[in-house]
Image (spheres, helix red, strand yellow):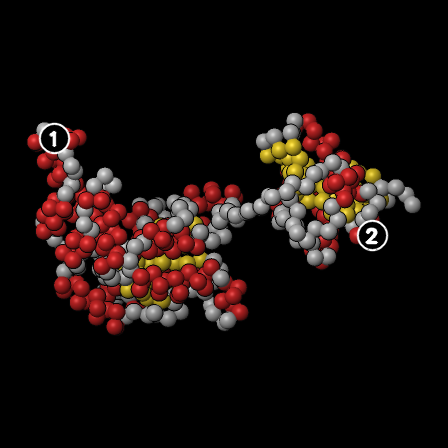
Amino acid sequence: MTPFRARDFHPDDVDAILRLWEEMRASGYDPVYGLSEVLSSCQEDHAVVAVHDDEVIGAAVGRAAHAQGWIVFLSTRSDWQGRGVGRTMLAALERDMAPLGLSKLSVLLPDTAGRVDAFSDQGFEAKRNLRYFERQLPVQRKELDTLAEVGGRLLPRGLWNEIGGMQTEKDLLERRLVMPLANADLAAAFGVVPPSAVVLFGPPGTGKTTFARAIASRLEWSFVEVFPSRLAADPAGLAGALRQIFERIDELEHAVVFIDEVEEIAVQRGGEPPSTMQGVTNELLKIIPAFRDRPNRLLVCATNFIRALDQAFLRHGRFDYVIPIGLPDDQARASIWSRYIPEAVAERIDVDALVAPTAGFSPADIEYAARRASQSALEHALDTGAGADSPGPQLDDYLRAIADTRATVSEEVARQFTEDIDRIARL
């Protein structure tokens, strides 16, 4: 039989490597590195193939990271296994990577790997007591430019868990939005269509933006906030700029798109002559169906004045859910207070004593009262000359600040919100 030989990878070898990959998977061997990573390293890093009569019978692919090299793919056609093909390719790959000055060449193998003789024959040693962890990064490098252009970002993990209290709202959003989106394949098996658009409504300052950001963090999707006021200055006009930014968002793999105060661009249409904003509302109504056609997308619109929205905007088929976000409950208010009390005095402040008198306060109201108490304590320390020897804000400072803070949400607004839940909410 004509002997095989090893040579450098050529772009024409891609189909052969794809066949080797498919044969490997069919045999029950689950490679550690994905096919896209292997093909990328073939083009950009280091790769050799074994050929017999100009036919590819095996491939070895490696990449370097600082002083360490990694074997990302090694496969030999089944009818050539046991003939030293793997050992020969590893030796050729090592020679190819030698000029890089590597101190170590490593390989990760799944438990299903059966034949490892090529590695042991080439001097690789099995390391004991090692565990392998991996994390799929939610945003790929090629998306970063697009994400920056649309003003988006990847939010820190854990924002969902930082929302204290509001358990009713959290449970509802978790079940209706997060669960089906994070488990799309399982949802499809149950006949559940993952949601693609939702409206959050409620009084000002109740945390609708916080929930939108937390949903993106929980899903580990890109977060893009669309600001109609900024788009209005675009030469294409607000309607044209709105269409353009959604076209760019369409290039992202996963995205939570957030429009706050959506009533600014989805107002009730009607009247003579038509207002200039009606064209913007019409454009948004056309954008939403196209947005819904793409998977891995969620549009979150927030409004303080849901009664001002155009009736066609809220109909079935455009938004899957219309969810109320109300004022924080006792547990949520305690959590918010704890966030704004300085760590140095936290042990001396009875947070429970601040919860009851702030019933009806929004998160923004509590933040204002907390900062007012800190400011008052600072002024007192400087006026008396105590300076750094001052004990800092005390319970009385917080209680006085609460008494001097006017709640944003009036009784009338709270009553209308309750009516809107009965009349408009869709859960």
Taking depth in this image into account, of 301 and 411 the one nearest to the observer is 411
**Which quadrant holds the C terminus?**
bottom left
Q: CA distance from mark 2 to mark 1?
A: 86 Å
Taking depth in this image into account, of 119 and 405 the one nearest to the observer is 119
Residue, disc 2 = 79
Residue sitting at the far left: 384
Residue, disc 1 = 386
**Residue at (67, 35) in percent of width and height:** 105
Q: Is residue 64 above or below residue 195?
A: above
Asked whether, in this view, residue 404 is left or right of residue 3, the answer is left
The amino acid at mark 1 is Ala
Asked whether, in this view, residue 122 is left or right of residue 295, the answer is right
Q: Can residue 58 be seen?
A: yes
Q: Position of residue 300 (x, y in %)?
A: 36, 58
Residue sitting at the far right: 1
**Residue at (36, 54) in percent of width and height:** 160
